[in-house]
Image (tube, helix red, strand yellow):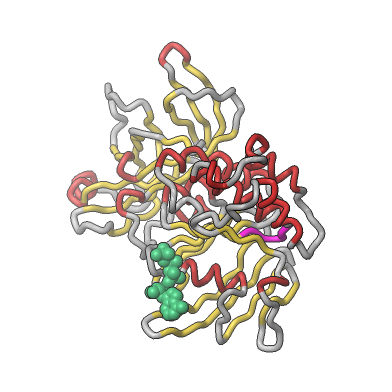
């Protein structure tokens, strides 16, 4: 009952969407894929902005669409955030937020005050939209969608129109959504780093079809994904700050199966963090490496090997305790080292990105 069950079939000249999906009723689900893969179309089907000829949408036990039912968009308890914030220019921020609230047709589960607090826009309430930065405008647009008390939040590449600096500014607020919102968020993105940072669940689309779906860590660790991630192939690990080495400005984060040193951040021991380890930063050795500049060496076992995009390269998935890492190695080195599923290896991790 607490899930979203969506099946849509839609045919346009040059594109067809054919998906059958179960999405969790909580957390952030990322719809991920290259341009034209159908992410926005799927989001619009969920919102009722697009009516698939064959569709069934059951939201937490309630039918929004099937052959007999069609709940129009304005009767669906959803918030929708577009790439560019479409705020009313003549209204203040507060006026814009109130406008969203008055349209609410359901009991507000998230009060206006909570939306303001969550997006950190309390100091902007009296301003007009043209006095806000792009990132601030987008935070107001998200708060407006939440102030209406939706039961689901749909976001279509909310960072796409922002430059890198603005993106960095807004990301912590989006992270809060994933930590603190009780409602499910469906988040469209084609940026792997954004997905790695924000999502709990991922749906990878290609050519209007779902090519992979599941919990983030598990799905990213798949090395057989048909969508090309290039330099972004890698895994995420849920970890916690374990030790600080203030003398060397380093910090150790522990995950299920081991720990990794990374640059020190202003975080207390015990703080939960998500880290991303890219396949290009992981190398393999049969013998325990001796003196090396790489601080992170972990015993591991090879689980699977798959072809990479370039014929000279392979992706190797290893288990480190209960966790998985992916290494990108050349086909020649894998052959020379005799690496095969089951091999005991040492992984060397050159760089660890904190998704914080
Ligand atoms: N109303 C429409 N009629 C016909 N074709 C459409 C329509 N809307 C979108 N398309 C086509 O459907 C395909 C999927 O589009 P969609 O916008 O869902 O992709 P996307 O994955 O969101 O892409 P992007 O990341 O570029 O936004 C594209 O080929 C697009 O040209």
Q: Which of 182/101 is in front? A: 101
Q: Which residue is the extreme one toward the top?
A: 247
Q: Which of 20/118 is in front? A: 118
**Residue 152 sits inside the magenta stretch:** yes
Image quarter for residue 75? bottom right
Residue 295 horizontal/vertical position (percent): 36, 25
Q: Quadrant of ligand 1?
A: bottom left
The residue under the point 69% across, 76% down is: 64
Which quadrant would the N terminus be assigned to in this image? bottom right
Q: In this view, does 2 lie above or below 281?
A: below
Q: Is residue 90 above or below residue 262?
A: below
Q: Which residue is the extreme one toward the front?
A: 90
Q: Which of 21/15 is in front? A: 15
Residue 349 horizontal/vertical position (percent): 36, 35
Q: Can residue 205 be seen in this view?
A: no
Q: In this view, does 218 lie to the left or right of 91?
A: left
The residue under the point 36% across, 63% down is: 227
The residue under the point 63% across, 80% down is: 56
Q: In this view, does 333 lie above or below 145?
A: above
Residue 211 horizontal/vertical position (percent): 44, 68
Q: Which of 31/311 is in front? A: 31
In this figure, what is the number of numbered marks? 0
Q: Is residue 317 visible?
A: yes
The magenta span reads: 149-153
Residue 207 horizontal/vertical position (percent): 39, 73
The residue under the point 37% across, 47% down is: 326
| Magenta residues, dominant SS class | loop
Q: In this view, does 206 lie to the left or right of 273?
A: left
**Residue 316 sits inside the magenta stretch:** no
């Amino acid at each position: 009952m607490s899930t979203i069950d969506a099946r849509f079939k839609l045919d346009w000249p040059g594109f067809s969407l054919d998906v059958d999906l179960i999405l969790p009723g909580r957390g952030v689900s990322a719809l991920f894929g290259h341009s034209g893969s159908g992410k926005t179309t799927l989001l619009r089907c969920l919102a009722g902005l697009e009516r698939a000829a064959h569709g069934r949408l059951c939201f937490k036990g309630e039918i929004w669409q099937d052959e007999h039912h069609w709940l129009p968009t304005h009767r669906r308890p959803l918030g929708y955030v577009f790439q560019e914030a479409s705020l009313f220019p003549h209204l203040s921020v507060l006026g814009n937020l109130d406008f969203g609230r008055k349209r609410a047709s359901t009991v507000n589960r998230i009060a206006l005050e909570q939306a303001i607090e969550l997006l950190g826009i309390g100091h902007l309430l009296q301003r007009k939209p043209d006095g806000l930065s792009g990132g601030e405008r987008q935070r107001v647009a998200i708060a407006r969608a939440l102030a209406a008390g939706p039961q689901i939040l749909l976001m279509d590449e909310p960072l796409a129109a922002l430059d890198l600096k603005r993106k960095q500014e807004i990301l912590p607020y989006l992270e809060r959504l994933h930590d603190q919102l009780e409602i499910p968020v469906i988040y469209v993105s084609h940026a792997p780093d954004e997905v790695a940072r924000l999502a709990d669940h991922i749906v990878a689309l290609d050519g209007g079809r779902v090519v992979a779906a599941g919990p983030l860590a598990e799905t990213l660790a798949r090395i057989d994904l048909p969508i090309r991630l290039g330099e972004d192939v890698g895994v995420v690990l849920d970890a916690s700050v374990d030790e600080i080495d203030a003398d060397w400005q380093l910090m150790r984060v522990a995950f299920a199966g081991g720990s990794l040193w990374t640059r020190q951040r202003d975080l207390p021991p015990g703080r939960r963090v998500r880290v991303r380890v890219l396949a290009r930063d992981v190398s393999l050795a049969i013998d325990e490496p001796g003196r090396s500049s790489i601080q992170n060496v972990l015993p591991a076992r090879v689980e699977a090997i798959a072809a990479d995009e370039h014929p000279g390269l392979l992706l190797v998935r290893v288990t480190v305790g209960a966790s998985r890492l992916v290494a990108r190695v050349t086909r020649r080195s894998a052959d020379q080292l005799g690496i095969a599923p089951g091999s005991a290896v040492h992984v060397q991790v050159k760089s660890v990105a904190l998704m914080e």
